[in-house]
Amino acid sequence: ILNVEQSPQSLHVQEGDSTNFTCSFPSSNFYALHWYRWETAKSPEALFVMTLNGDEKKKGRISATLNTKEGYSYLYIKGSQPEDSATYLCAPLSGGYNKLIFGAGTRLAVHP
Amino acid sequence: ETGVTQSPTHLIKTRGQQVTLRCSSQSGHNTVSWYQQALGQGPQFIFQYYREEENGRGNFPPRFSGLQFPNYSSELNVNALELDDSALYLCASSSLSSGRESEQYFGPGTRLTVT
């Protein structure tokens, strides 16, 4: 069974602060890692799909890195804004099909 | 928006009843996955359908079943509802022909409450 852990569980920051979260997963049989952003009452939104060790991806103020050998990924938000408030989920891809194994998420609240 | 829709938005059922949830995939996607999200947890994989055939299943009992139709829309059926089935049910569409690392596009979910 794949165990995916995300930390911290929740985070409160002030507007303008930079922040980062961690996703840890077993490094064996790794294929890809997905990051999603989930705002309340909306659909989860895909942020990144990462496949290669050392991969770095960026979308605006949000970036992510991947270490498949040690089994972790970091998500960074530079200069947080209130609209960044959401739950951030990571999910490694497992098995012979497109099965995502989600962590419990990091809930971010950005205060003006 | 992702282009994936789900119906109904909310549903209240009684223990022992049966329920059908529906999902319309994004145009061009041939794969649909269903997830259950209980309070305080991440979404848990129920099963996946690819070209109308079940293509993998998570740790859910047989009373959770599904269908995928030729237009790639999908249904999740749950029989003999239990209180623990109360959760948000999400469907996600993708295109396996784009590779296993392709993004999955989620619908907004159906909130099921079992009383």
Image: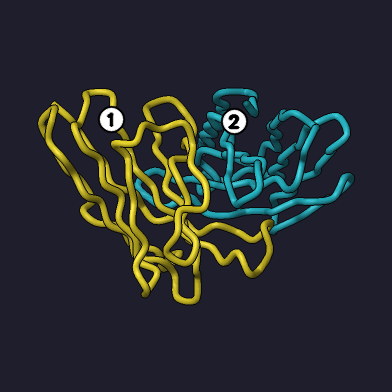
Chain letter belonging to callout 2: A
Residue at (45% x, 45% y) in the render: B47
Residue at (72% x, 30% y) in the render: A25
A82 relative to B67 in the view: left or right: right
The percent position of residue A32, horizontal first and vertical second, equals 73, 48
* Secondary structure of residue under mark 2: strand
Rendered view: A99 above or below B105: above
Q: Say which quarter of the image contains residue B13.
A: top left
Q: Say which quarter of the image contains residue A10.
A: top right
Q: Identify residue for label 1.
A: B85
- What shade does chain B have? yellow
The percent position of residue A77, horizontal first and vertical second, equals 69, 43
Q: Identify residue for label 2.
A: A13
* Foreground pick, A13 / A86: A86
Mark 2 Cα shell of 10 Å, populated few (<14), some (14-19), many (≥20):
some
In the image, which disc is placed on residue A105? none
Residue A6 visible in the snapshot = no
